[in-house]
Image: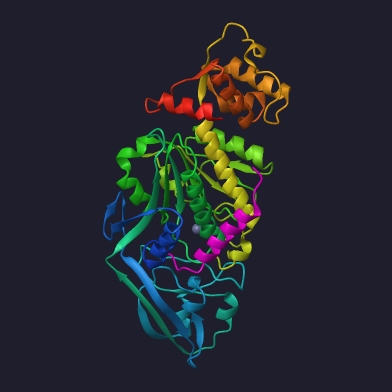
């Protein structure tokens, strides 16, 4: 799976298209984002009314904004929302006021370490208003009386999220989740949106054992809305990944599920080690993105998280410097490939039973010796011997790949050949796995 530069550029183009939109946890920017995704995949957009109780939370009023300005004592514009979405504290209430510099300053937010960056601030659940600006601009403001206008609306409306459901051969599911609520932040949002959208399109064209749900929702309240509306079906989720921060130059980072022992944890560890030697696996912590909700003890879903840098793990995080210049086409493409490889491993990781367990079966008699598909005869034979030796129904192909250090794809191919030669049969997984389906898949190889 060598990556194609065209895919990286396509991902970068979509991230670029999404970047200027003023997203928040509700409102038209979020809807516009979902509609742009909908032009690429048949996303179903769901709306949850303001005021809806969601576990310990409540869907807030819908927020929309047309403009916001700070004018200095001479009437000159010193901060203009039109110049950058981050200039306004997200969820700022409408304001039209005159105030002295000292009073204004309590409403102005600057970046803690860089004087030229605009920080990203929100006030979703406390009525408030404020502006964000570079410290250099703040420090140059003259004394006097300022005029401030925020043309926003906070009114009963709804929270939007998008879901693409892709049925597979079984009703068991894999969940892919990405947040969709950050305005004009490139790595921390548009990279995840672009990769998840392209991944969904690839999945739609791929044979699927599992059913997939790809969800694009605002952080925290959005995942809680999704969890509430889908609570009775959560038992079907066998694997899941939260996606985000996938376009910067940092190596891939997998954050384990809260369980730490889920199959997705073993699969992601294996794939990352194979793909990027400097990749990292970190344990679960109750801080980060929507794994906080998906892995909360009342759900405890087998969901890990794939990013490059982690939340709060790079200097530009949550500032205007997290712009398109931070995104790399090759990093985006390799992130997509890692997701694809994880999913292919999820799809292929089954347990088998050796149907000729007394002694080694004679491979030559069944035409299983020799080279095939660019593999050396020795590797092919070793892979088959490993699969036969371990297939008593307890060891998965991933377990065998780990023990043999032969790589999952090599082991998977050996199992398929042995299955075709009737030396192996798939152990039926959950009741939902249709055996005819898995036979067909194997024989197609
Ligand atoms: Zn963020």
Residue 314 image position (x, y, % from top left):
61, 57
Residue 99 image position (x, y, % from top left):
42, 85
The quarter in which the C terminus is drawn is top right
Q: Is residue 108 left or right of residue 276?
A: left
User: Residue at left 53%, top 68%?
Assistant: 119
The quarter in which the N terminus is drawn is top right
Residue 249 visible at all: no
Magenta-tinted stretch: 1-24
- Is-magenta flag for residue 149? no
- Is-magenta flag for residue 6? yes
Number of numbered discs visible in the structure rendering = 0
Quadrant of the rendered structure where residue 384 is? Answer: top right
Residue 234 visible at all: yes
Residue 13 image position (x, y, % from top left):
56, 62
User: Residue at left 50%, top 64%?
Assistant: 18
Q: Is residue 372 left or right of residue 88?
A: right
Residue 361 image position (x, y, % from top left):
61, 10
Q: Nearer the viewer, residue 8 or 320?
A: 8
């Amino acid at each position: 799976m060598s990556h194609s530069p065209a895919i990286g550029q396509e991902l970068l183009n979509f991230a670029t298209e999404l970047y200027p939109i003023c997203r928040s946890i509700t409102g038209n920017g979020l809807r516009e984002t979902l509609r742009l995704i909908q032009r690429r995949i048949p996303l179903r957009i769901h709306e949850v009314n303001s005021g809806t109780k969601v576990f310990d939370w409540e869907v807030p009023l819908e927020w929309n904004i047309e403009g916001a300005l700070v004018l200095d004592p001479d009437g000159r514009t010193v901060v203009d929302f039109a110049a950058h979405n981050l200039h306004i504290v997200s969820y700022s209430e409408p304001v039209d006021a005159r105030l002295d510099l000292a009073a204004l300053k309590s409403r102005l937010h600057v970046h803690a370490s860089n004087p030229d960056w605009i920080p990203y601030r929100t006030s979703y659940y406390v009525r408030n208003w404020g502006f964000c600006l570079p410290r250099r601009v703040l420090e140059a403001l003259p004394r006097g009386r300022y005029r401030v206008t925020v043309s926003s609306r906070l009114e009963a409306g709804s929270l939007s999220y998008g879901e693409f459901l892709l049925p597979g051969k079984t009703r068991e599911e894999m969940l892919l989740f990405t947040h969709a609520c950050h305005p004009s932040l490139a790595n921390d949002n548009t990279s995840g949106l672009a990769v998840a959208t392209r991944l969904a399109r690839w999945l739609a064209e791929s044979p699927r054992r599992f059913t997939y749900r790809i969800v694009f929702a605002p952080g925290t309240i959005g995942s809680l809305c999704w969890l509430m509306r889908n609570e009775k079906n959560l038992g079907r989720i066998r694997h899941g990944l939260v996606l985000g921060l996938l376009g910067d130059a940092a190596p891939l980072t997998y954050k384990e599920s809260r369980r730490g022992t889920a199959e997705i944890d073993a699969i992601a560890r294996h794939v990352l080690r194979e793909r990027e030697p400097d990749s990292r696996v970190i344990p679960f912590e109750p801080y980060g993105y929507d794994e906080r909700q998906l892995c909360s003890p009342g759900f405890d879903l087998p969901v890990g998280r794939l990013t490059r840098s982690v939340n709060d793990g790079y200097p530009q995080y949550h500032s205007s410097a997290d712009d398109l210049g931070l995104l790399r086409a090759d990093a985006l493409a390799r992130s997509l490939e890692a997701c694809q490889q994880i999913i292919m491993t999820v799809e292929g990781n089954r347990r088998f039973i050796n149907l000729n367990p007394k002694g080694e079966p004679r491979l030559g008699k069944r035409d299983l010796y020799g080279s095939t598909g660019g593999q050396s005869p020795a590797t092919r034979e070793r892979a088959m011997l490993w699969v036969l030796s371990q297939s008593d129904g307890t060891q998965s192909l991933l377990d065998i790949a780990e023990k043999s250090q032969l790589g999952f794809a090599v082991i998977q191919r050996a199992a398929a050949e042995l299955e075709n030669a009737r030396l192996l049969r798939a152990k039926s997984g959950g009741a939902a796995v249709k055996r005819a389906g898995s036979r067909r898949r194997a024989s197609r190889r």
